[in-house]
Image (spheres, rainbow, N blue to C red):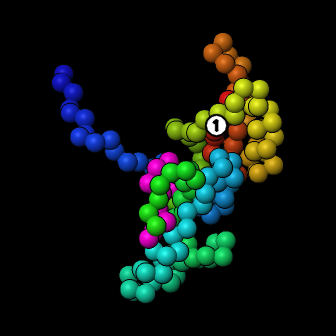
Amino acid sequence: MTQPPAPSTPLHWKLVIDAGDPHAQADFWAAALGYVVEDNSALIEKLLDAGVVPPEIIVEHHGRRAFRDLIAVRHPDDPFEEGSGTGLGRRLLFQRVPEAKTVKNRLHLDVHAGEGRREAEVARLEQLGASVLRQVQEPGGTWTVMLDPEGNEFCVQ
């Protein structure tokens, strides 16, 4: 079987995570990863002024306007669009969904704490609102499986 050709340039992507409270999740993950909560207020002002979006879909978050059902965090060193605040590199987008999480994630983040720092990192993440699900010790390594504030699994290595 022949493989389809690869894209001519690498594809830009983001990881989208369903959430009950996207703003709380964004705050947790920004603090957990050392990321920045995106500031889309300039874009929102333009969209409101043009009548493209209704005011009902906007909330105030950290003293600035944000979309009620969507918010992203981005790596602080990655580029972003000045006019929209949208990250152009590593980012997590949290979108509101009506249903609660009910089963194990099929995709999760691994956080690499660095040699000898896993226990301290787990303690820091617990202070931010995460909880330990279990400790794993296998021939291939040792890590801690944690839950973020909405119950999504992630690992600390």
Q: Is residue 20 magenta?
A: no
Q: Percent x, y for residue 96? A: 54, 62
Q: Main secondary structure of the magenta part?
A: loop
Rendered residue at 72%/26% (across/down): 115
Residue 145 in view of the camera:
no
Q: Quadrant of the C terminus?
A: top right
Q: Is residue 71 left or right of residue 82?
A: right
Q: Quadrant of the N terminus?
A: top left
- Kindly give the residue lying farthest to the left in the view shown: 2
Q: Percent x, y for residue 9? A: 28, 42
Please report the bounds of the magenta region as a residue range: 83-94
Rendered residue at 43%/81% (across/down): 46
- Kindly give the residue lying farthest to the top in the view shown: 139
Q: Residues within 10 Å of mark 1 (few under 14, many from 20)?
A: some
Q: Is residue 48 left or right of residue 150?
A: left
Where on the picture, by quarter, is residue 10? Answer: top left
Q: Which residue is mark 1?
A: 111
Asked if 120 appears above or below 20 in the picture, the reply is: above
Rendered residue at 34%/45% (across/down): 11
Where on the picture, by quarter, is residue 116? Answer: top right
Q: Is residue 136 left or right of residue 37?
A: right
Q: Nearer the viewer, residue 78 or 152?
A: 78
Asked if 101 appears above or below 65 in the picture, the reply is: above
Mark 1 residue type: Val
Asked if 77 appears above or below 46 in the picture, the reply is: above
Q: Tag 1, which secondary structure? A: strand
How many dots with numbers? 1
Q: Percent x, y for residue 135? A: 75, 27
Rendered residue at 60%/60% (across/down): 37
Asked if 136 appears above or below 59 in the picture, the reply is: above
Q: Nearer the viewer, residue 29 or 148?
A: 29
